[in-house]
């Protein structure tokens, strides 16, 4: 079985964040995990929130936010450590973001993973499965969301390489 993380935090916990300056403004991306209830019970909920904000004198103005969660009693959200990448992914001199997380299970079943890319603050997702079967450890399958058809091939190749680097 895999190591089950501390599953008792009722408050969101920041698991990664990065801040950068662009065009005279400061921006920040935060990735948070929040677990509520008791693992392996019907009152369980595990949630991942990622958000980008523009830092102002009065706080942080939200640019985008995504939320994903599981209420299945044997699943939890697991951020793929150090996967948050800030880079100009499409060559337009604007900072884009990439990160990855898993909807982890009890360690016996395949896991769902998602990699999220924001280019010009538009979300693109790659969804897939990681095998846990002893004969297929490390193997995965994935599918680009239909929105990827709007991107140029260079950007698709760059995000696929980020996915490969984080899976392996």
Image (cartoon, helix red, strand yellow):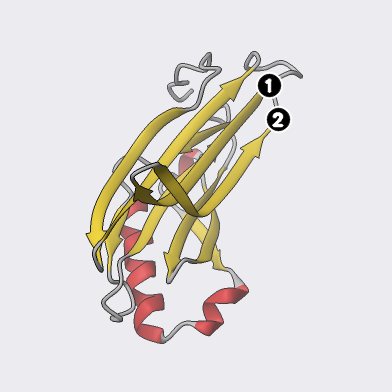
Q: Position of residue 120 (x, y in %)?
A: 43, 71
- Residue holding disc 2: 72
Q: Which of the two marks, 1 or 2, is nearer to us in this view?
A: 1
Q: Secondary structure at mark 2?
A: loop
Number of dots carrying numbers: 2
Label 1: element kind = loop
- Seen at 33% across and 50% down, the residue is 84
Q: Nearer the viewer, residue 78 or 2?
A: 78
The reply to whether dot 1 and dot 2 touch (C-beta < 8 Å) is yes
Q: Is residue 105 above or below residue 168?
A: above
Q: Residues within 10 Å of mark 2 (few under 14, many from 20)?
A: some
**Which sits earlier in the primary sequence, circle 1 or circle 2?**
1
Q: CA distance from mark 1 to mark 2?
A: 7 Å
Q: Looking at this rendering, what residue extends furthest in the bottom direction?
A: 152
Would residue 38 appear left or right of 131 to someone viewing this image? right
Q: Does residue 31 lie above or below 156 as drawn?
A: above
Q: Write the residue at 32% across / 42% down.
A: 17
Q: Is residue 148 visible?
A: yes
Label annotation for residue 44:
1
Of 80 and 8, nearer the camera is: 8
Q: Is residue 163 above or below residue 70?
A: below
Residue 96 in which image quadrant: bottom left
Q: Position of residue 50 (x, y in %)?
A: 48, 45
* Residue in the foreground of this view, choosing between 134 and 139: 139
Q: Is residue 86 above or below residue 133?
A: below
- Can you name the residue that lies furthest to the right here? 42
Camera sees residue 136 = no
Tell me if 136 is positioned left or right of 96 in this view: right
Rendered location of residue 150, percent (x, y) = 53, 83
């Amino acid at each position: 079985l895999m190591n089950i993380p501390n599953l008792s935090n009722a408050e969101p916990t920041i698991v990664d964040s990065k801040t950068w300056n662009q065009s005279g403004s400061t921006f920040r991306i935060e990735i948070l995990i929040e677990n509520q209830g008791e693992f392996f019970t019907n009152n369980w909920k595990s949630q991942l929130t990622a958000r980008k904000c523009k830092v102002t004198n009065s706080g942080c103005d939200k640019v985008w936010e995504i939320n994903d969660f599981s209420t299945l009693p044997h699943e939890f959200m697991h951020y793929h450590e150090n996967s948050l990448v800030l880079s100009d992914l499409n060559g337009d001199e604007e900072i884009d973001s990439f990160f990855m997380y898993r909807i982890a299970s009890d360690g016996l079943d395949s896991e769902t993973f998602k990699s999220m890319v924001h280019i010009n603050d538009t979300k693109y997702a790659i969804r897939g499965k990681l095998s846990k079967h002893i004969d297929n450890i490390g193997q995965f399958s994935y599918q680009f969301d239909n929105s990827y058809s709007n991107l140029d091939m260079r950007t698709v190749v760059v995000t696929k390489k980020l996915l490969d680097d984080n899976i392996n």
